[in-house]
Image: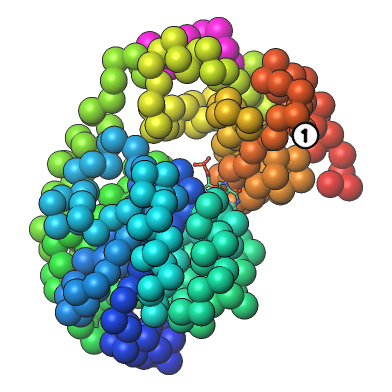
Amino acid sequence: MQDITPNNIDMLVSLIGRAEHITVVSHMKPDGDALGSCLGMYHFLGLCGKQDRKVVLPHRTPYYLNFLIGKEVAGDILFHEDKAAAAEDAIRRSDLIICLDFNAFHRTDKLEQVLSDSTAEKILIDHHLSPDREKFTLSFSETEISSASELTYQILMQTPMIGNDAGRLPEGSALALMTGMTTDTNNFSNSVYPSTLRMASDLIEAGVDRNMILSSLYNQYSETRMRLMGHVLKDLMTITKDGVAYIVLDRKTLQEYYIEEGDTEGFVNLPLSIARVRMSLLLKEDGDKVRVSIRSKKGISANRCSRLYFNGGGHENAAGGRLYIPKDIAGISEAAAYIEEHTHRFMTDENI
Ligand code: 5GP
Ligand code: MN
């Protein structure tokens, strides 16, 4: 935890103390860790007596996270895709912006410009590789950690308001941080460190209802999601001779199964249970681009593969990116050939 120093904690506390209009921001297509870390911070700001605090996200959150958005929060959360002017205005009016779970402004899609233009003090709390530190007054960047939610937890624990006692975290913070950590570790199956389990037990001791979190996250999906999963595993998964599994979901298939944002959560991990699969890719057609999720086993860098061939990045074993139509491929029907060609080069060329 190189950045969690007494000096940096003092600076965080004084930046928050001085600020009157605070906005908390996370990345496009926000997931459990994005919303969890934002709400963890949002509720802490409430404890600090900050009345004017907003959470601004580029897009709506998936429906399985709705249990985190109570009445109090709903009035203070702005999704840019729904309320662009209000979201941008909140950022423009801010004297402090706290950026969570992303490493560079371009990860916020249409918020990039307004964030770059803002002269407010900015704090980064993130666990991705290559953070854009120069853009921030204060950065907490840690890659050897489960999630931005865990990093936020470790930071808040060091503040005088919490004083290393998880029981003093606002209830909403504790619930949100536990949720974000749970989703980013895929329910404790990857990126789990001793500190992650300590955080979990401290939060459970402090009263967080883990059963409620699990049933909200994993037992409320639509039936069509599971039917699509069957179709994917039986007919749509290809495994190359290099041990790369890939699944392409075109618009037609997504429509046929009434797939909503968040419904394909976890699909990309499924092929990794096969012994000979070393890397897995999930592609989803989305307008004039194809969204790409990559997961890899130890020794293969999903981050590097994404940076090289999929206009993205992320963590060593979990990354994301996108293919642009028609820049990278002429259409979705060319996605399979693109993956086969580029992952073959990636898996076999020692110079890469
Ligand atoms: P997912 O497959 O769940 O969309 O993304 C996996 C991980 O990679 C997440 O932690 C996500 O934040 C990160 N990620 C996704 N796309 C990008 C990208 O374009 N750049 C970077 N740096 N990280 C990304
Ligand atoms: Mn994360």
Looking at the image, residue 179 sits to the left or right of residue 191; the answer is: left
Task: Classify residue 248 by image quadrant.
Answer: top right
**Closer to us: 159 or 322:** 322
Residue 92 drawn at (x, y percent) = 43, 70
Between residues 35 and 165, which one lies in front from this camera angle? Answer: 35
| Residue position for label 1 | 327
Residue at the image point whose x is 32% and y is 53% from the top: 78
> In x, y percent, where is residue 25?
41, 61
Q: Can residue 201 be seen in this snapshot? A: no
Query: Residue 320: x, y in percent?
Result: 59, 43
Q: How crowded is mark 1: few (under 14 residues within 10 Å), some or many (20 or more)?
A: few
Q: Magenta stretch: residue 230 in it?
A: yes
Relative to 93, residue 234 above or below: above
Q: Is residue 290 magenta?
A: no
Q: Which residue lies furthest to the left in this view?
A: 207
Identify the magenta region. 227-237
Q: Which amino acid does label 1 sit on?
A: Lys
53 lies above or below 307 = below
